[in-house]
Structure formats: structure tokens, C-alpha cells
Image: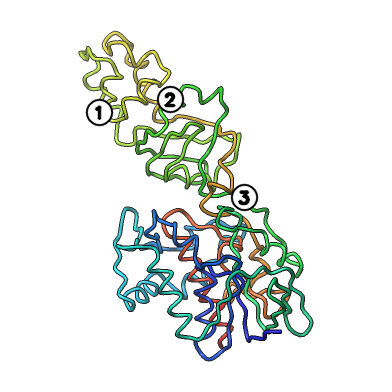
Amino acid sequence: MRSYDAIIIGAGAAGLFCAFQAAAWGKRVAVVEHNEKPGKKIRISGGGRCNFTNRVVTHQNFLSDNPDFARSALARYTPDDFIALLEAYNVLWHEKTLGQLFCDDSAQQIIDMLISECAKNAVDIHYGIQVQSVLFSNTFNLATSAGEYQTEQLVVATGGLSIPTLGASDLGYRIAKHFGHNVIDPRPALVPLTFSLSSWKNFQGISGVSTEAIVNTAAVSFRENILFTHRGLSGPAILQISSYARSHEDFSIDLLPNVRTEDLARDFPSEKRHLATLLRGHLPQRLVEVWEDDRLHVPINEVPRAQTEAALCGMHSWTLKFEGNEGFAKAEVTSGGVDTRELSSKSMESKHQKGLYFIGEVVDVTGWLGGYNFQWAWSSGFAAGSNIRA
């Protein structure tokens, strides 16, 4: 039997970060990972350059059944703290739109940095190990494919169900339930939306067309690009809204966020061009061509002004009901997870079982697109690791 002061299940962003924090003051720490390599999700993120955090992060950039839970951890380990770590390793980075921060070179630099920190603090990382069960009797006892492990403190950093090709599993939820925790039903988040064939037939032919838009639900609004797909909609604004919207409920899209009807209307009385012609300066031509509204295809001065304004209003407030989404296979993250009401917001420790922690995506804290979920990994990992080493 292998014995450690702390064992972290999962060598993803949260698990690796927690491991070297926990080991920093001499604790004997091991990471147990079922994949043969660490940080698979880090490696593919941000187009291979890892959107590792955002310039401005608050608890309001996260969804949870317990909305204030993330405040403490996010305040104790901030984007500036992670940037300082990157700069200590000479990892160059740049800022894109909306405060998103990316590596200049490769996401592999983030993985290498985390592994280096683990090595510096003598963390043992065991790959290709399947955890079969976790029991507690004075200590945590892990039955694995490589024999038994024993530890006084156990951190579950197993992630969610998104991207199963990278090895996603429900292990973390099963461990939580075993120790009496409630699990908020996991569902795909930051995921493309799909529509019924009958409602989407006009748009199937413009798959790949992208345009800036404002996407709204009753609760929230996002202004970024949307992308038409063969089955529905994707793109940053849609991925964002997917975490809030529910199937068969209305949401709306403003396809003309830069167009004020009153500005166009000044020339309506003498305008001989079609509205479709004017809109091609503001929308992709292929989208205008498939948009179902006859008022777009007659001279503007032959249509009552109220009718032309109504046609524009329909594009400013395109109301939709989506049928479903592309599922965990295409979801960037998993919404739901271990109920945070049963965890300490300061340390991520279970309120049911002393020495048991849950961090990262397995917890019911889901960030927006744009680096927020990685920041939650760093912040929650720091919270648990700091408590273990104390």
C-alpha cells in the first residue's frame, strides 16, 4: 500500500495546481491520473494556446445554484497571481477581446509549468491508474488498478462529463454521492445549440457563416459572434447563452447590433434600393438571401415605412426556441456538479467528511467562455492546497 499525506485524483488544471500548493511546505503528495499524460484539456484549449484566465474575474462570471460560493476562492487567488507565476517561467502571453488571455506560443507551456512546479515540490504523479473505489476508515483508502493507496486528505479533481474522448468520467460525482453529497444534475455547457429540421431548413445551406450579434435571455445578454451550423448555432455568443437558456424556451438574437433603424429611416422616402441591398453592408450576404421576409426584396420607397421598420425589428429581435444541443461531446465544460452548499467556500473541504475536498469542474461552479473556468481551476486548487499544507 502506498501512503501519502494527500492524494489528488486527476492531473488536469485544478488537480496539478492543487498538488504543488499542497506540497509546498513538505507534505507528501501524489496525483493519480487515469490518462497516460497530464492536462489533456489544457492542451486543446484556446485553439492550442490556452485561454488561461481573463483580465477581470468576479463571481458574477460564474453560474451556480449557490451564486456567492466562488467569491472567497476567486478573491484569494486572482488572475494577477497566475500571471505572476507565468512570468516567473518566462511564458509570454497576450490579451484578446473581452479580456481573454492566451499564451503566445503553446498551451503545452502551461502544462510544462504545472509539471515543473509539481516536480520542484516533490509531487509524485502516477499515470494510467484507474480508481475503482474510495472508502474511509480513519484514513481514505483507494482501490486502484495499480493496488491500494492510503491518505489522510483526498482531493477530487476529476472534472466533468464534457469531451469524453479526453477521458471524462462520472467518478467525481460517484465519490461525492458515496460520502453523502448532493450532486446538481450535470449538463452540457458552453455548447452549440440545435434546432428542429423544420425550423432550421432555410439555414442549413449557410453553415459556416458568422456574424456579430447580441444574444439575449431574460437573465443575461452577450455580444459576440454567432456561427451558423448545419444543425443550429454556435460561436462565442451562443456558447455563452447555452449555459443559461433552456430548450423550448424563447431567447432572442439581435442580428444588427450596429444598426439603428432611425439612421436608416432618414432616406426611406426616396430610397429605391431594396432593404436587402442596404443590409449587405451589415450582414453576410448569404444570411440576407435566406432570410424569410418579402419586404427585404422590394424597393424601400414602395413599402410603407412602418412595414420596413417592422422588417428591421424582426432582425433586431429574432426570437428562437432551440430543440437541444450538441451534448457533452461538443461541450467545453459541464454545468452542475457537487453541491457547493455542502463545501467550505474558503477551503473546498466537504462539510460531511473531514479531509475530503472537491475542486475545479466537478463542483457546481461554471464559468463563462473566456478563461473563467481555468481561473476557477487555479483559485479552487489554491484554496484546497493551501488548507492541506497549513
Please name whichever residue, 141 or 137, is drawn nearer the observer in this view of the structure: 141
- For residue 22, the mark is none
- Of the 4 image quadrants, the one containing the C terminus is bottom right
The residue singled out by tag 3 in the image is 187
Question: Picture coordinates of residue 101 (x, y %)?
Answer: 35, 61
Q: Which of marks 2 and 3 precedes in the sequence?
A: 3
Say which amino acid is labelled 3.
Arg
Percent across and percent down for residue 99 are 34, 58
- Asked if 281 appears above or below 341 in the picture, the reply is above
Residue furthest to the top in view is 302
Foreground mark, 1 or 3, reads: 3
Q: Left of 237 or right of it: where is 298?
A: left
At label 3, counting other C-alpha atoms closer than 10 Å, the crowd grade (few under 14, some 14-19, many 20 or more) is some
Q: Nearer the viewer, mark 2 or mark 1?
A: 2
Depth check, front residue: 309 or 381: 381
125 horizontally vs 170: left or right: left
Q: Quadrant of residue 249?
A: top right
Q: Look at the numbered discs 2 and 1 and tell me whether their residues touch, using CB distance below 8 Å.
A: no
Residue 299, compared with residue 219, is above or below; it is above
Q: CA distance from mark 3 to mark 2?
A: 29 Å
Number of residue marks: 3
Q: Amino acid at mark 1?
A: Gly
Residue at x 40%, y 60% (from the top left corner):
50
Q: Which mark is residue 205?
A: 2
Residue at image point 52% right, 41% down: 218
Q: Mark 2 belongs to which amino acid?
A: Gly
| Disc with the residue nearer the chain's start (2 vs 1) | 2
How far apart are the alpha carbons under marks 2 and 1?
21 Å
Give me the disc on residue 281. 1
